[in-house]
Image (tube, grey):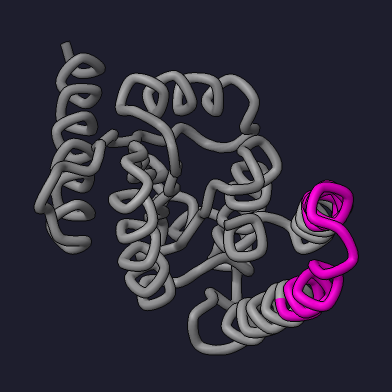
Amino acid sequence: YLVWFGPMRLARIFGYTWLAIYCVVAGTRFGPEMYPLLVTLAITSVMLGELVGAFRRRLEATSLTDPLCRVWNKRGLEVLLKRTIQIMQRNGSSLSMLFLDLDDFKRINDTEGHSAGDRVLRAFSSQIEAATRPQDTLARVGGDEFVLLLPGATAEKAQETAQRLRQVVDAPAWSFGVAEMRAGETAEEFIERADRVLLEEKRRRKTAAEG
């Protein structure tokens, strides 16, 4: 889980520490006859972890990432989300999503130029990543639209995360939609539902501003 969702350094520290403790305990309890099995288990676990880590790095460096913001792109999100849904459902864990959208981003491009708009997008994505957990995943799915996956988070927790991000992310105004994964829901339906909540939120904020 950590190898796929978290920093490789953290995955190594946690994984190797757990593996060492397990081998010591098992070896002490069952004696020398367990040593060959434990050595095989340790070597296999390390090799699998490193292979998965290398595969993840290779994916991130190819067509699954956004070249501007250095986060997952829409295609990468679809691949990752389907895998994440399987893991969360198997573990019985919650999975929530924030659909993020910069308000009036077109105005920035029109008045300050596309280079300024690119700088805003890069700054926004980097600050979001810096302010979230290692297992959270950010993807750029449109011009100024992002999706933040929050494994293990309920809709209430995701709402709290969004409100906290609004306080710490130094960027132009942005809106968000919150959705928690429902049983039997596909990845596409999950994303579409979060997008609809975002649009409703933007309409609500626009109406409040005009009023």
Q: Quadrant of residue 79?
A: bottom left
Q: Residue 1 at what x, y percent from top left?
A: 57, 57
Q: Residue 188 at what x, y percent from top left?
A: 17, 63
Number of callouts in the render?
0
Q: Quadrant of residue 143?
A: bottom left
Q: Quadrant of the C terminus?
A: top left
* Residue 27 horizontal side relative to residue 145, left or right: right
Q: Please determine whether, in this image, residue 202 is positioned above or below residue 122.
A: above
Observer-nearest of 160 and 111: 160
Q: Which residues are magenta?
A: 17-44
> Is residue 6 in the magenta section?
no
Q: Please determine whether, in this image, residue 88 is positioned above or below residue 44.
A: above
* Residue 166 horizontal side relative to residue 60, left or right: left
Q: Quadrant of residue 93?
A: top left
Q: Residue 124 at what x, y percent from top left?
A: 59, 47
Observer-nearest of 149 and 14: 14
Residue 106 visible in this rendered orientation of the protein = no
Observer-nearest of 188 and 209: 188
Q: Which residue is pictured at 39% across the width and 52% down the height?
A: 147
Q: Please determine whether, in this image, residue 28 is positioned above or below residue 116.
A: above
Magenta: main secondary structure equals: helix
